[in-house]
Amino acid sequence: MAHKKAGGSTALGRDSQSKRLGVKIFGNQAVKVGNIIIKQRGTKWHPGKNVLRGSDDSLYAKVSGTVKFSHKKVKGFDGKLHNRKFVAVA
Protein backbone atom coordinates (compact mmCIF):
# COMPACT_ATOMS: atom_id res chain seq x y z
CA MET A 1 0.00 0.00 0.00
CA ALA A 2 1.26 3.47 -0.86
CA HIS A 3 2.36 5.71 1.99
CA LYS A 4 2.00 8.97 0.05
CA LYS A 5 -0.80 10.44 -1.97
CA ALA A 6 -0.12 10.62 -5.70
CA GLY A 7 1.88 13.79 -6.44
CA GLY A 8 -0.28 15.24 -9.19
CA SER A 9 -0.19 18.80 -10.42
CA THR A 10 -1.76 21.48 -8.28
CA ALA A 11 -4.38 23.96 -9.44
CA LEU A 12 -2.75 26.70 -7.41
CA GLY A 13 0.70 28.23 -7.46
CA ARG A 14 0.55 30.29 -10.65
CA ASP A 15 1.06 34.03 -10.58
CA SER A 16 2.02 36.59 -13.20
CA GLN A 17 5.15 38.69 -12.96
CA SER A 18 4.71 42.20 -11.57
CA LYS A 19 4.63 44.87 -14.27
CA ARG A 20 6.43 47.57 -12.24
CA LEU A 21 3.75 50.20 -12.78
CA GLY A 22 3.58 53.56 -11.05
CA VAL A 23 5.29 56.92 -10.83
CA LYS A 24 8.95 56.77 -11.89
CA ILE A 25 9.87 60.46 -11.58
CA PHE A 26 8.18 62.48 -8.83
CA GLY A 27 7.23 66.16 -8.58
CA ASN A 28 9.96 68.83 -8.78
CA GLN A 29 12.50 66.27 -10.02
CA ALA A 30 14.52 66.89 -13.18
CA VAL A 31 13.58 64.97 -16.31
CA LYS A 32 15.25 64.59 -19.72
CA VAL A 33 13.62 64.24 -23.14
CA GLY A 34 12.03 60.79 -23.55
CA ASN A 35 12.18 59.79 -19.89
CA ILE A 36 9.23 57.77 -18.60
CA ILE A 37 7.40 59.72 -15.90
CA ILE A 38 4.57 57.26 -15.15
CA LYS A 39 3.85 53.67 -16.25
CA GLN A 40 0.14 52.91 -15.99
CA ARG A 41 -2.76 50.87 -17.34
CA GLY A 42 -5.47 53.19 -18.58
CA THR A 43 -5.38 56.94 -18.01
CA LYS A 44 -5.23 57.37 -14.24
CA TRP A 45 -2.90 60.31 -14.96
CA HIS A 46 -3.41 62.47 -18.05
CA PRO A 47 -0.68 64.17 -20.12
CA GLY A 48 -0.34 67.91 -19.60
CA LYS A 49 2.03 70.43 -21.16
CA ASN A 50 5.18 68.88 -22.72
CA VAL A 51 4.10 65.32 -21.86
CA LEU A 52 3.20 62.60 -24.39
CA ARG A 53 1.14 59.44 -23.90
CA GLY A 54 2.54 56.20 -25.31
CA SER A 55 0.58 53.29 -26.80
CA ASP A 56 0.68 51.48 -23.44
CA ASP A 57 -0.64 54.65 -21.67
CA SER A 58 2.81 55.47 -20.25
CA LEU A 59 3.60 59.18 -19.90
CA TYR A 60 6.86 60.48 -21.40
CA ALA A 61 8.66 63.82 -21.20
CA LYS A 62 8.59 65.78 -24.46
CA VAL A 63 11.21 68.31 -23.28
CA SER A 64 13.78 68.54 -20.50
CA GLY A 65 12.68 70.27 -17.31
CA THR A 66 11.01 69.56 -13.97
CA VAL A 67 7.91 67.44 -13.40
CA LYS A 68 4.73 69.10 -12.06
CA PHE A 69 1.59 67.29 -10.87
CA SER A 70 -1.81 69.01 -10.76
CA HIS A 71 -5.56 68.39 -10.45
CA LYS A 72 -8.13 69.99 -12.72
CA LYS A 73 -11.89 69.71 -13.16
CA VAL A 74 -12.72 68.76 -16.74
CA LYS A 75 -16.15 68.42 -18.35
CA GLY A 76 -16.68 64.88 -19.62
CA PHE A 77 -18.81 63.55 -22.46
CA ASP A 78 -21.69 63.09 -20.03
CA GLY A 79 -21.68 66.84 -19.29
CA LYS A 80 -20.50 66.39 -15.69
CA LEU A 81 -17.32 67.76 -14.16
CA HIS A 82 -14.67 65.16 -13.36
CA ASN A 83 -11.58 65.77 -11.24
CA ARG A 84 -8.62 64.66 -13.39
CA LYS A 85 -4.94 64.36 -12.49
CA PHE A 86 -2.42 65.86 -14.92
CA VAL A 87 1.36 65.63 -15.31
CA ALA A 88 3.30 68.45 -16.96
CA VAL A 89 6.96 69.27 -17.58
CA ALA A 90 8.01 72.90 -17.16
Image: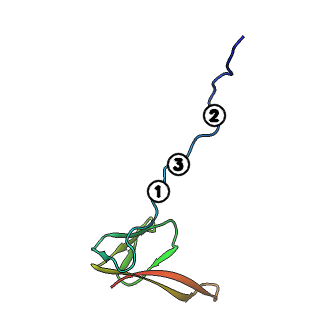
Tell me, for residue 41, which label it has, or none: none
Per the image, label 2 sits on a secondary structure element best described as: loop
Q: Residue furthest right?
A: 1
Tell me if 13 is positioned left or right of 19 in this view. right
Q: Amino acid at mark 3?
A: Ser
Q: CA distance from mark 2 to mark 1?
A: 25 Å
Residue indicated by mark 3: 16
Q: Amino acid at mark 2?
A: Thr
N-term-proximal mark, 3 vs 2: 2
Q: Are dots 3 and 2 in contact, CB under 8 Å? A: no
Q: CA distance from mark 3 to mark 2?
A: 16 Å
Per the image, label 1 sits on a secondary structure element best described as: loop
Residues packed near mark 1 inside 10 Å, few (<14), some (14 to 19) or many (20 plus): few
Tell me if 79 is positioned left or right of 40 in this view. right
Q: Are dots 1 and 3 in contact, CB under 8 Å? A: no
Per the image, label 3 sits on a secondary structure element best described as: loop
Q: Is residue 21 above or below residue 37?
A: above
Q: Nearer the viewer, residue 42 or 28?
A: 28
Pinpoint residue 44: horizontal percent, then vertical percent.
Answer: 52, 73
Residues packed near mark 3 inside 10 Å, few (<14), some (14 to 19) or many (20 plus): few
Total label count? 3
> From the image, which quarter does the C terminus lie in?
bottom left
Q: Which residue is pictured at 33% across the width and 77% down the height?
A: 29
Residue indicated by mark 2: 10
Q: Which residue is pictured at 59% across the width and 40% down the height?
A: 13
Q: Is residue 51 above or below residue 81?
A: above
Pinpoint residue 60: horizontal percent, then vertical percent.
Answer: 36, 72
Tell me, for residue 19, which label it has, or none: 1
